[in-house]
Amino acid sequence: MADSSALVSETGRSLLADSSVLDSKIIETSKENVFRATVLDVEEEMPQIETRVVLVQEAGKREELLKALEEIKMPYIKTDTIEELGDSDSPEFETIFVVSDFQAPIFSNLCKADCRVIGPPVVLHCAQRGEPLPFSCRPLYCASMLNLVLCFTGFRKKEELVKLVTLVHHMGGIIRRDFSSKVTHLVANSTHGDKFRIAVSLGIPIVKAEWIYKAWEKRNEIGFCAADDNFRNQFKVPPFQDCMLSFLGFSDDEKANMEEMTEMQGGHYLPVGDERCTHLVVEESTVKDLPFEPLKKLYVVKQEWFWGSIQMDARAGESMYLFEKSESPDFKKSVSLLSLSTPNSNRKRRRLKETLAQLTRETDMSPFPPRKRPSAEHSLSIGSLLDISNTPESSTANGETPKSCARPSKNSTPLPLKQSARWQVAKELYQTESNYVDILTTIIQLFQVPLEKEGQLGGPILAQEEIKTIFGSIPDILDVHTKIKEDLEDLMINWTESKSIGDIILKYSKDLLKTYPPFVNFFEMSKETITRCEKQKPRFHAFLKINQAKPECGRQSLAELLIRPVQRLPSVALLLNDIKKHTAEENPDKITLERAIESLKEVMTHINEDKRKTEAQRQFFDVVYEVDGCPANLLSSHRSLVQRLETVALGDDLCDRGEQVTLFLFNDCLEIARKRHKVIGAFKSPHGHTRPPASLKHVVLMPLSQIKKVLDIRETEDCQKAFALVVRPPTELNNKLLSFQMTTEEPRKEDWLKTLCRHVANTICKADAENLIYVADPDSVEVNTKDMDSTLSRASRAIKKTSKKVTRAFSFSKTPKRALRRALMSHSATEGRSPSSASESFIGSRLTSTSSLAGVPSPSLVSLPSIFERRSHTLSRSTTHLI
């Protein structure tokens, strides 16, 4: 595509060139705010020029304009034609014309007469800020592009370019023909050209021409700014605009994923070999040669170009990512024979040897060293130990230590060729510790630091909260293990059998206890955040693809690398046990190692306990979010969720019979919630996490101390998996019977009742939890589950709900029960009754009133029968025994 800078038309050239010169002069006089008046020192003899505003046609009919001019104390007149204003050219006045329509003929006449023209939004803007009207050599309709410097590229049609430039000037923007550091936005019609490449490298926003048109549509909105990120990002140029991509050497899943990403980023994909293709993306690890001779216009690039373009949200330069064909073995052999036959063959051999040695050292630097045979492991010298462990004292392939890398104080000590078993295990501990430190360093340097870097091209890839959730306390863990590695390295260099390995672990046991629990406890949340962000944010997905393909990662994903801290402490404990086995009884390190192992066990126990508490807290919040209207006092540091049970209500006391009820058993209370009939919208947190809507409605939060008896209802043909609770609420004088039917296979009814009774006994400080369970016949408590799933039963429940709604809607009795009770008590007191008799009278009237209103008494309010059988003996017939 041709660049707009290549326009040869004299009109176009003067338009852009003059704009640059004139706008630069304006910026020099007013860089910060063109709406502030410039104070000039004038000679006393110069006459004062009065500024006046002329409201043309429709502008004079707008009341808000008249009020705005009065606020800034600017005199104005109204006119329909220029001819009416006879002294428009008078030198005594600086006339500013306010025109509502920049497409009207009168606007063109004013521009031809070189008059100063502004739009109504400019007046309203100045009145809002209390500023004088601006001076502008061009017609200025609004200030939505004020202080923006634009440059154009890729536009071939002169008419379109002239129109865009005119609109930018009308909105207060400035045009530059050549790209410079002052340019704030590049308007691109193509992703080719030098201007595009420079804008990408400098991180300048690149937008489509539609951005200008949409901004002009919003010209009448006071306070609107075209540079607003949310508005501008809608019109950014996608990375693969004008690109036709093909993919070679990828698996079917990878290819499908990359094709989907291509379309999301504004490009198109074609089969390999299509002549319309502009880019061939190659998997360099599997493709060694191309199946065809590519055309000159085709870019053959590595996959890093593809993911890099998505990551920085702009098409990356192809020159850095070109795919190069590997040379044939015959060609390499001929080159090597030719080089050996030259007079400088010795020098070339030496250079090749140094290169191989350097490559060897670089290979040893990897945190994922190649696996070695057991025989090779046992034959390692101290030099090879330092090679594998990625220390600065790396040895070369021939066993010699380079002078530039060696530290004489550590490598000068000769060691016996054959080492003890204790030394061998200690060496393995040091090697694994060194590799672990390298992995943590890779996580931080390759992933965390780039994500936290400021000024990223295309803006931040992740929010700071997401970065903190993913990496957690990894930097603190790295600091601790770096110190452990250094101490182990000193121990191995100056090795003696009396050296204490346990002291090193004990030295940092408190640091391990401080740094590991925060990371291990939230590791699952870290993995979930990685998965969610990778799906929702293409730039983060591209970032992971680029970095996980690097050799430092050893072909492992970020989630696989982050699991290493979870595995490290158990691994160290096993190695310390092996060292202890090969330590003599008289060695003082024997006891120290035992203490070190115990300290690691304490750390792991603390982690498990902390994790259990964390999981319990998460379960707490899950209950709070799931139950609408859940009491705030449910959240307590001493409370934990024991079990959840899905049931159906068999009585009408708590809710309607047959309604689905969920019981949440905590260690000291029982939360009862019913299923919601109408579900509200989903909850969305400030960080964008969407939580499902609450599916349950709070009914009652009951302390376990209110449960007096637990009834195990016998299994019959008409009653299956039913149980009941005898409870005494503090506001009631009689016991209540709450009956339920279990709707799930797990847990078993017997196990659930035992668990419930155990926690009730713990709450009321009783040791005999089994004595709380009683066996009862279904008929004795009037419980039946036979018709719970029938169509007639469901219809009856629906009619009852509708009836209750109608009753509430037409009810004229809104007197609260407490107010009624106080009135009755005061009435009885005036008649001279004793408090006890008044209370009895009130209870009787209350029960009578309740029964008369309800019509049919609820099974939970009837007198409890005396046929309960305990598993060990028969109960007394007195109902007071149940209290």
Image (spheres, rainbow, N blue to C red):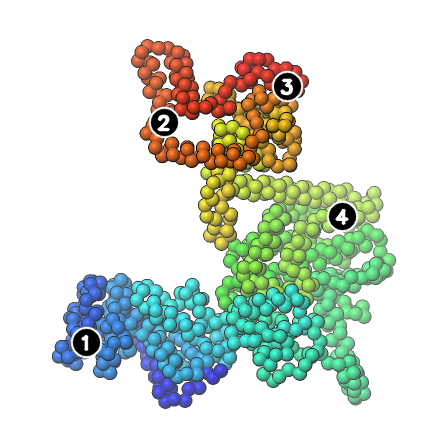
In the image, which is nearer the foreground, mark 4 or mark 1? 1
**Viewer-nearest residue: 190 or 324:** 190
Q: Which mark is residue 870?
A: 3
Question: Which image quarter holds the C terminus?
Answer: top right
Report if the CB atoms under discs 3 and 2 are less than 8 Å apart: no
**Which of the two discs, 3 and 4, labels the residue nearer the N terminus?**
4
> What's the amino acid at mark 1?
Glu
N-terminal of the two: label 3 or label 2?
A: 2
Which of marks 1 and 4 precedes in the sequence? 1
* Residue on which the image places disc 2: 816
Q: How far apart are the two marked residues, 3 and 1, measured between alpha carbons? A: 105 Å
* Residue annotated with mark 4: 574
Q: Quadrant of residue 131?
A: bottom left
Of marks 3 and 4, the one in the foreground: 3
Tag in front: 4 or 2:
2
Mark 3 or mark 1: which comes first in sequence? 1
Name the residue: 48% across, 40% down.
676
